[in-house]
Amino acid sequence: MELHARKHVRGWTAILTILSLALVFGTVLGYVPETILPRADPLIGVVPHVNVLISATAILTILYGVRSIRRGDVSRHRRAMLASTGLFFLFLALYLYRVSLEGPTTFSGPGWVRQYVYLPFLAVHILLAIISLPLVYYALLLAVTTPVARLPDTPHPRVGRLAATFWVVSFLLGIGVWFMLHVLF
């Protein structure tokens, strides 16, 4: 099984990316019927605030993972990156739950801020999130299907650096989006 997965990392990356993006865009566009989910109104109201804490924590775990591997500590790197992945999936589950029941949050600030600040900020955040998704899957799949001693000879280090960079910037921009939606305006 491991050898099969190792030989098909790109294929599994493509499948996971397509399924993930279909789930996200399907939810955001309203294709997930809200009747299939239990409604917990107190949870719905705090999801954006919980998710900003999850995002900040994920940034820290990603940076810790990068620092750990630069110091040669593979074990800490692995734990940090798995924690980052877990935090991302928790973030995504909460985000999709809220969006499926409430729809995307509407920007309530001035029109010029929406047009020249918020929308470009949001667009770059979304673009980086989309770009980082297959990179994260690819790096993660390489890590779990390749012996640690052979990982430096794979694309894992190069792809992992890109994934970590885009992931951190996307999380940072997501925090900025939250700030504009829930604090500033």
Image (cartoon, helix red, strand yellow):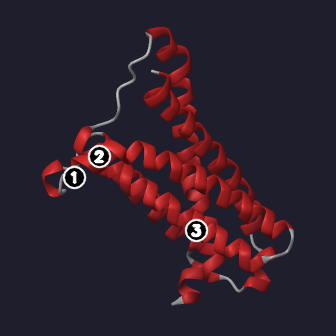
Residue 157, by quadrant, is: bottom right
Q: Position of residue 164 (x, y in %)?
A: 68, 55
Distance CA(mark 1)–CA(mark 2): 6 Å
Q: Residues within 10 Å of mark 3 (few under 14, many from 20)?
A: some
Residue 109, by quadrant, is: top left
Callout 3 amino acid: Ala
Q: Which residue is mark 3?
A: 83
Q: Which residue is mark 1?
A: 40
Callout 1 amino acid: Ala
For marks 1 and 3, the one nearer the N-term is: 1
**Label 2: element kind:** helix
Label of residue 90 in the image: none
Label of residue 44 in the image: 2
Left or right? Give the position of 6 relative to 15: right
Q: Residues within 10 Å of mark 2 (few under 14, many from 20)?
A: some
Q: Position of residue 95 (x, y in %)?
A: 38, 49
Contact? badges 1 and 2 (CB < 8 Å): yes
